[in-house]
């Protein structure tokens, strides 16, 4: 129903996984999702990049991981990277949108996501796409003598013929990063993955290959997906998430980023879900292939790490927390 928030509306959930760390994360995503959503009406799709000119070496999921994912009800669908590949692996989430059925609502999540409550409590308005606001001011980094935040962002809106002023949060000061539409790409959603993916790919490729002059001093990697994403969402009539989406990055989903960060800062519920879904022997046998899972979960070092941090007084910036974990010798991916 366009323009209306509908509780329990069917949609397809997408993540991207490949051989290595991401396949272990995908197992945790799928198991936690099915545990929290046994009656999910849509499809849980794991997109798998295939080896090819832009992905050297083996990218396909290992057989044990594939079996766990399929047992959790996930569909594993292959796709070929034609634009990004290993030079910019974050581009997988852009190109993978092409495997989803057109005109069916979708929600994308990074594999480093746990589900801690039913997702049907989230009232998605698929006609108004949005994305995660759990981010820091990582881009742009304006030079001392300009251009500033406003000029940099406006150059991108101008590049694609988008109106700029309505994207601004006027409650925030001019030239402060929060004033400008900027998301974490850990989750995002829309009504039509074909339309969304086409714009996402066109914008990201254009910025990569021919950045506006205002971006001359800016690093584009690894931020390219997060540079293009606000433009896509704004072009499709979306914007910042409202209270109907509070469960994402809240009581419903947890974007944990790295296992040591999960133990250091996330909720008791998220840690309990992680350890519960990882406990069965068939799962343990597979996930022990991850050094981080083996040491932090199965050897109990995660709980010891958790005891070192007061979650009511964590460092303001994630990098400071990462550094503190490294000093303990427990920064494991």
Image (cartoon, rainbow, N blue to C red):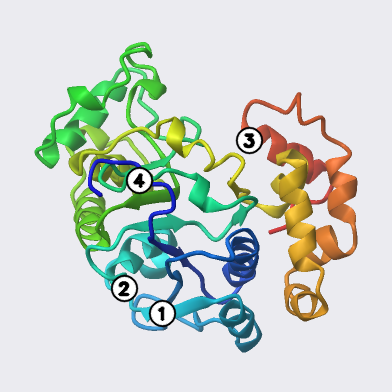
Residue position marked by numbered label 3 in the rendering = 318
Query: How many other residues sit within 10 Å of disc 3, few (<14), some (14-19) or many (≥20)?
Result: some
The numbered disc on residue 44 is none
Toward which corner of the image does residue 241 lie, by quadrant?
top left
Residue 3: image location, x then y, percent: 24, 41
Q: Which comes sooner in the sequence, label 1 or label 4? A: 1
Toward which corner of the image does residue 285 lie, by quadrant?
bottom right
Residue extending furthest toward the left: 161
Residue position marked by numbered label 4 in the rendering = 220
Note whether 284 is above or below 5 in the view shown: below
Residue 275: image location, x then y, percent: 79, 59
Do tag 1 and tag 2 residues touch (Cβ < 8 Å)? yes
Q: Which comes sooner in the sequence, label 4 or label 3? A: 4
Query: Which residue is pictured at 20% across the width and 28% down the height?
Result: 154
Query: Which residue occupies the foreground of this view, 29 or 37?
Result: 37
For mark 3, give the secondary structure.
helix
């Amino acid at each position: 129903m366009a323009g209306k928030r509908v509780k329990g509306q069917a949609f397809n959930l997408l993540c991207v996984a490949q051989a290595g760390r991401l396949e272990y994360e995908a197992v945790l995503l799928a198991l936690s999702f099915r545990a929290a959503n046994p009656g999910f009406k849509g499809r849980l799709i794991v997109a798998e990049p295939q080896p090819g000119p832009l992905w050297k070496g083996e990218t396909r999921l290992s057989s044990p991981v594939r079996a766990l994912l399929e047992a959790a009800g996930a569909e594993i669908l292959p796709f070929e990277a034609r634009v990004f590949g290993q030079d910019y692996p974050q581009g997988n989430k852009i190109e993978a949108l092409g495997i989803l059925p057109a005109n069916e609502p979708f929600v994308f999540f990074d594999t480093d996501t746990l589900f801690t409550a039913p997702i049907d409590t989230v009232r998605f308005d698929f006609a108004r796409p949005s994305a995660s606001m759990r981010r820091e001011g990582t881009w742009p980094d304006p030079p001392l003598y300009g251009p500033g935040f406003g000029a940099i962002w406006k150059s991108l809106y101008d590049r694609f013929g988008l109106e700029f002023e309505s994207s601004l949060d006027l409650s925030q000061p001019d030239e402060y990063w929060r004033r400008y539409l900027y998301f974490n790409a850990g989750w995002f959603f829309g009504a039509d993955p074909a339309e969304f993916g086409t714009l996402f790919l066109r914008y990201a490729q254009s910025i990569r290959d021919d950045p506006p002059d205002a971006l001359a001093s800016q690093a584009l990697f690894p931020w390219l997906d997060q540079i293009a994403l606000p433009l896509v969402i704004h072009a499709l009539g979306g914007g910042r998430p409202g209270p109907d989406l509070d469960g994402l990055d809240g009581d419903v989903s947890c974007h944990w980023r790295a296992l040591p960060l999960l133990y250091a800062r996330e909720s008791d519920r998220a840690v309990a879900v992680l350890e519960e879904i990882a406990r069965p022997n068939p799962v343990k046998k597979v996930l022990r292939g991850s050094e981080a899972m083996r040491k932090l979960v199965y050897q109990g070092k995660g709980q010891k790490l958790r005891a070192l941090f007061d979650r009511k007084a964590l460092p303001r910036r994630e990098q400071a927390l990462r550094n503190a974990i490294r000093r303990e010798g427990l920064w494991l991916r």
